[in-house]
Amino acid sequence: MELASVRGCRRIELTARADHPRAIRLCQTHIFILEGRLRDAERIDGQSHDLFLMAKLLPNLAC
């Protein structure tokens, strides 16, 4: 995340499967905030899965 900030990125986004609590906890540990739920966004082996959209805002180093 430091590299992204140095390169001028202000935001990092990711998705995590809604039924994967360990992945969600990992994201929250790194201060990613839940911003929304993408219903039936992923299909694996014929089953639909919801995804959580999570994001983290980075500090602006130029300020």
Image: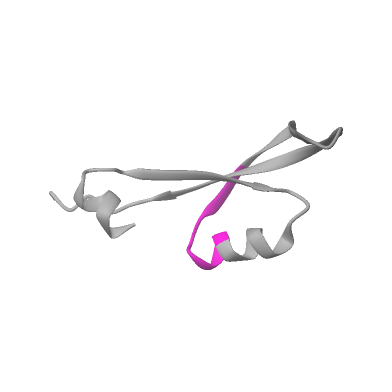
The residue positioned 74% from the left and 56% from the top of the image is 20
Q: Is residue 26 left or right of residue 19?
A: left
Q: Residue furthest front?
A: 45
The quarter of the displayed image where residue 10 is located:
top left
Q: Position of residue 3 (x, y in %)?
A: 26, 55
In the image, residue 58 sits, relative to residue 44, either above or below, namely below
Q: In front: 10, or 50?
A: 50
Q: Is residue 11 left or right of residue 14?
A: left
The quarter of the displayed image where residue 51 is located:
top right
Q: Position of residue 62 (x, y in %)?
A: 13, 49
Q: Residue furthest left?
A: 62
Q: Residue furthest right?
A: 46
The residue positioned 69% from the left and 65% from the top of the image is 22
In the image, residue 22 sits, relative to residue 46, either above or below, namely below
Residue 31 inside the magenta-drawn segment: yes
Q: In front: 37, or 20?
A: 20
The quarter of the displayed image where residue 59 is located:
bottom left
Q: Is residue 44 left or right of residue 16?
A: right
State the scheme by which the image is colored: one colour
Q: Quadrant of the N terminus?
A: bottom left
Q: Position of residue 57 (x, y in %)?
A: 38, 49
Q: Is residue 27 left or right of residue 48?
A: left
Q: Residue furthest bottom?
A: 29
Which residue range is magenta in the image? 27-35
The residue positioned 74% from the left and 49% from the top of the image is 18
Give the tally of numbered discs.
0
